[in-house]
Image (cartoon, rainbow, N blue to C red):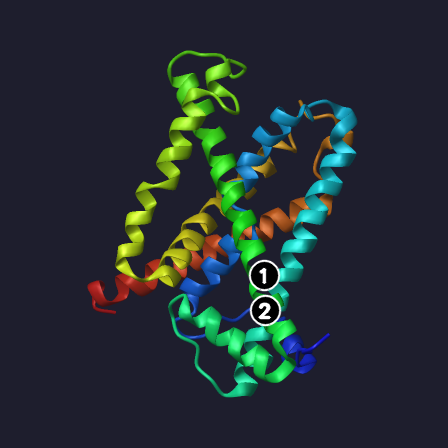
Amino acid sequence: IIAAPNLGSIASGLVPTLPPGGVLYTLALAGGVGGTITLAAYGYWLREKGWYTPKWMRVMRIDNTMAYVVTGTFVISMLIVGAEVVRAAGVTLSAGDRGLLELTDVLDERYGPVIGKGFLVGFWAASFSSVIGVWNGVSLMFADFWGNMRGLDSDHPDSRLGGKYFRFYLVWLTFPPMILFLLERPIALILAYGVLGSLFMPFLALTLLGLLNGKRIPREWANRPHTNVMLGITALLFVVLGIQQLVKALTPILGG
């Protein structure tokens, strides 16, 4: 452990508050941590791996739990780095990709080159795995969607991994978005992706509340009470946040 958080500040952070102008970053953080679009793609990965019978439920739960534990650990660690290391060093990081190198310089100076270079390797690994997951998962979703639009069964080779629809969208997802880098605002693109992804969360929560509490779901696979509570809180938070932003946007127009 090279840096520890301020436990008092963490405790005060348990009270839900949003700093001025912090809505965008809050949504981006929720979109990045929550899994968002990859949760929708998870069903396709299960299909490709053959994990679609009840005997795989335990494996799926372990798989999801470990994914969120690792993701949560990474995010909390990055928050600690930002709050305790960068702030303590009294530096302001650039908004572009140069900021990563500047943070590495801070880590090199305070903890040595091993920690600094290790941070870069770890950050690259986390980013690369996220890119691979989106490439694969979203391409599978598109392949299934387009196959169904053309009247093909979901098990048709063209709609599966490696099929022509999958390969087409893989190319589309790879090269056209590179044009956006001409804007020279990579952080803004990441925030935009996170915000758009976070909009998926309330729809997912409401869908799971209805789907996994239905009469057709076996009791052993249905939602537990605590799961329903958490899904309800998730949906409610986004609804409240949306109403607040709507009121804020309409107030100047209505002369409030």
Residue 79 in view of the camera: yes
Q: Are marks 2 and 1 in contact (CB under 8 Å)?
A: yes
> Foreground residue, 4 or 214?
4
Indicate the position of residue 126 as horizontal and vertical percent values. Answer: 57, 55
The quarter holding residue 209 reads top right
- Amino acid type of the residue that numbered disc 1 sits on in the rendered structure: Val
Identified at 44% across, 64% down, the residue is 25
Identified at 70% across, 38% down, the residue is 223
Which of the labelled discs sits on residue 117, or is there none?
2
Note whether 146 is above or below 241 in the view shown: above
Tell me: 106 left or right of 184.
right
Secondary structure under the numbered disc 2 in the rendered image: helix
- Amino acid type of the residue that numbered disc 2 sits on in the rendered structure: Lys
> Foreground residue, 27 or 62?
62
Note whether 207 is above or below 96 in the view shown: above
Provide the residue designation for mark 1. Answer: 121
The quarter holding residue 52 reads top right
Quadrant location, the C terminus: bottom left
Secondary structure under the numbered disc 1 in the rendered image: helix
> Foreground residue, 154 or 2?
2
* Circle 1 residues within 10 Å: few <14, some 14–19, many ≥20: few
Quadrant location, the N terminus: bottom right
Identified at 47% across, 23% down, the residue is 144
Note whether 217 is above or below 89 in the view shown: above
* Circle 2 residues within 10 Å: few <14, some 14–19, many ≥20: some
Identified at 60% across, 62% down, the residue is 75
Indicate the position of residue 44 as horizontal and vertical percent values. Answer: 57, 29
